[in-house]
Image: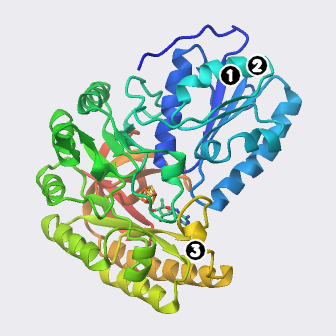
């Protein structure tokens, strides 16, 4: 797809972008920044003096959207201070709510869905001439593979390898906000990886809503992983998210047999009740899922697993919920992202009502959070005394003396800075742990 470079008035230059939601949005914000940068705008770290303020939004649950509505109330202050400031809503919420966002918020100037980011420079210019701009068409082909993302981190990179989702899980708004599944070409991904390697990057994360269904002609996701592993043999390679239906033996073998493919798998289960899984249109049963976990653990013995769980899906009974509780205890995940079901308009589950009360959802959620914390604490306490290679990411939010980093298995490690710098791989021996964090010290 050809990119058009527009002339930008010299008075309009700085943009600030705020990102909500999943890693796809983080990667998209870098694509948007790359695109705007190429068209004469400059990226700003603060909203204060920006000419354009962009919110890259999420629609996955109602509370994600509420957060944006709250943020828009705050942004009125910027508009009052500078009526010329342009406020843009992009991403999933733009796709879902469209003109409603402009009609209900007289401060929103532009609304752009996930497949129309190329129109942003033009829409920003037009909005300056007082016409609100809207572009929300979904595409079957757009992958932005010719856009160089503007990365603010210089040793860790997200690489979006595919967009959209065709799974239509009955609870999920993503197929409606991000459209049909499409993959980037293998060559364009490899070129990006090589460039990152040459610029000194240490870790990349290949992302997509459902990376297991990646396809470029005869190449599948396992082939892509093999190629990426080969061209970036010195880098750590992660990937997310996997769907249990498409996790092939070939992929498991590929991860097991390549040292730089990280032994960490995020495998959302959502529920352990087959009745609920069927209503969710997850297309696997819990026996299949458990078989996968067993197979992966056998072939990749030090693998770490995380999952996603939804409690309170329509008609979920105490018995259904108990199956999920028992399953968590059985699998013993290293971590889990746990959510209360949130009805989303247009989805199949929307038609099923919202039969589980908010109180029951809360009590089921609290119960599994408590159980999962205990499980993770036990797993992590067994790591005390062991030494891991840790990539130093950033300063710990709790102490300026400590770094925050991750092991290959995606465990968070906090350790005294010593001589380590951001981006360094260091050996850290674990001395203490809790359910979410390992604490250690650098060893030679
Ligand atoms: N309500 C609650 N959780 C949801 N998720 C997706 N849609 C919903 C919804 N309507 C969760 C799923 C998914 C994760 C990204 O978000 O667990 O795996
Ligand atoms: Fe949503 Fe299911 Fe697609 Fe994940 S696989 S994005 S939960 S529809």
Contact between marks 1 and 2 (CB within 8 A): the answer is yes
From the top left corner, tell me how far across and down residue 188 is, in percent: 29, 27
Question: Camera-side residue: 352 or 19?
Answer: 352
Distance (Cα) linking label 1 and label 2: 6 Å
Distance (Cα) linking label 1 and label 3: 40 Å
Task: Pick whichever of labels 3 and 2 is earlier in the sequence.
Answer: 2
Answer above or below: position of 276 versus 337.
below
Determine the residue positioned at 22% across, 70% down.
292
Identify the secondary structure beneath mark 1: helix
Mark 1 vs mark 3, foreground winner is 3
- Which quarter of the image is occupied by the N terminus? top left
Distance (Cα) linking label 3 and label 2: 44 Å
Identify the secondary structure beneath mark 2: helix
Which label sits on residue 231?
A: none
Please name the residue that numbered disc 2 is placed on: 128
Answer above or below: position of 79 versus 396.
above
Answer above or below: position of 306 versus 207.
below
Classed neighbour count for the residue bearing mark 1: other residues with Cα under 10 Å, few (<14), some (14–19), many (≥20): many
Mark 3 vs mark 2, foreground winner is 3
Please name the residue that numbered disc 3 is placed on: 352
Scheme of image coloration: rainbow
Classed neighbour count for the residue bearing mark 3: other residues with Cα under 10 Å, few (<14), some (14–19), many (≥20): some
Identify the secondary structure beneath mark 3: helix
Label 2, ligand 2: CB separation under 8 Å: no
From the top left corner, tell me how far across and down residue 384 is, in percent: 31, 71
Contact between marks 1 and 3 (CB within 8 A): the answer is no
Left or right of residue 38: residue 15: right
From the top left corner, tell me how far across and down residue 346 is, in percent: 59, 58
Which label sits on residue 124?
A: 1
Determine the residue positioned at 24% across, 33% down.
186
Determine the residue positioned at 71% across, 15% down.
12
Ligand 2 image-quadrant field: bottom left
């Amino acid at each position: 797809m050809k990119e058009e470079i527009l002339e930008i008035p010299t008075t309009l230059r700085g943009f600030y972008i705020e990102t909500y939601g999943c890693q796809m949005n983080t990667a998209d914000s870098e694509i948007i920044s790359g695109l705007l940068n190429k068209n004469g705008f400059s990226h700003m770290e603060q909203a204060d003096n920006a000419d354009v303020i962009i919110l890259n939004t999420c629609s996955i649950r109602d509370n994600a959207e509420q957060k944006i509505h709250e943020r828009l109330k705050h942004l009125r202050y910027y508009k009052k201070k500078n009526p010329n400031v342009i406020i843009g809503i992009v991403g999933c919420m733009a796709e879902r709510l469209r003109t409603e966002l402009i009609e209900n918020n007289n401060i929103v100037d532009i609304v752009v869905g996930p497949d129309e980011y190329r129109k942003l420079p033009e829409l920003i210019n037009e909005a300056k001439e007082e016409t609100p701009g809207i572009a929300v068409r979904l595409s079957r082909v757009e992958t932005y593979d010719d856009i160089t993302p503007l990365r603010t981190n210089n040793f860790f990179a997200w690489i979006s390898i595919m967009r959209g989702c065709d799974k239509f899980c009955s609870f999920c708004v993503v197929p409606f906000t991000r459209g049909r599944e499409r993959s980037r070409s293998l060559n364009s991904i490899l070129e990006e990886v090589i460039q990152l390697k040459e610029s000194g990057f240490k870790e990349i994360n290949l992302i997509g809503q459902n990376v297991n269904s990646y396809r470029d002609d005869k190449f599948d996701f396992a082939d892509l992983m093999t190629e990426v592993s080969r061209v970036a043999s010195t880098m750590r390679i992660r990937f997310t998210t996997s769907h249990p239906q498409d996790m092939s033996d070939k992929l498991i073998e590929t991860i097991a047999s390549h040292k730089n493919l990280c032994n960490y798998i995020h495998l959302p289960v959502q529920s352990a009740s087959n009745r609920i899984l069927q209503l969710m249109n997850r297309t696997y049963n819990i026996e299949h899922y458990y078989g996968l976990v067993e197979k992966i653990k056998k072939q990749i013995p030090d693998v770490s697993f995380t999952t996603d769980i939804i409690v309170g899906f329509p008609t979920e009974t105490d018995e259904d919920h108990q199956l999920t509780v028992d399953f968590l205890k059985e699998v013993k995940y290293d971590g889990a992202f746990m959510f209360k079901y949130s009805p989303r308009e247009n989805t199949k589950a929307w038609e099923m009502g919202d039969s589980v009360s908010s109180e029951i959802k809360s009590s089921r959620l609290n119960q599994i959070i408590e159980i999962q914390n205990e499980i993770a604490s036990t797993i992590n306490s067994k790591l005390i005394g062991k030494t891991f290679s840790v990539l130093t990411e950033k300063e710990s939010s709790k102490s300026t003396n400590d770094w925050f980093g991750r092991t290959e298995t995606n465990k968070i490690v906090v350790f005294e800075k010593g001589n380590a710098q951001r981006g360094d791989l260091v050996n850290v021996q674990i001395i203490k742990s809790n359910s979410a964090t390992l604490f250690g010290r650098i060893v030679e």
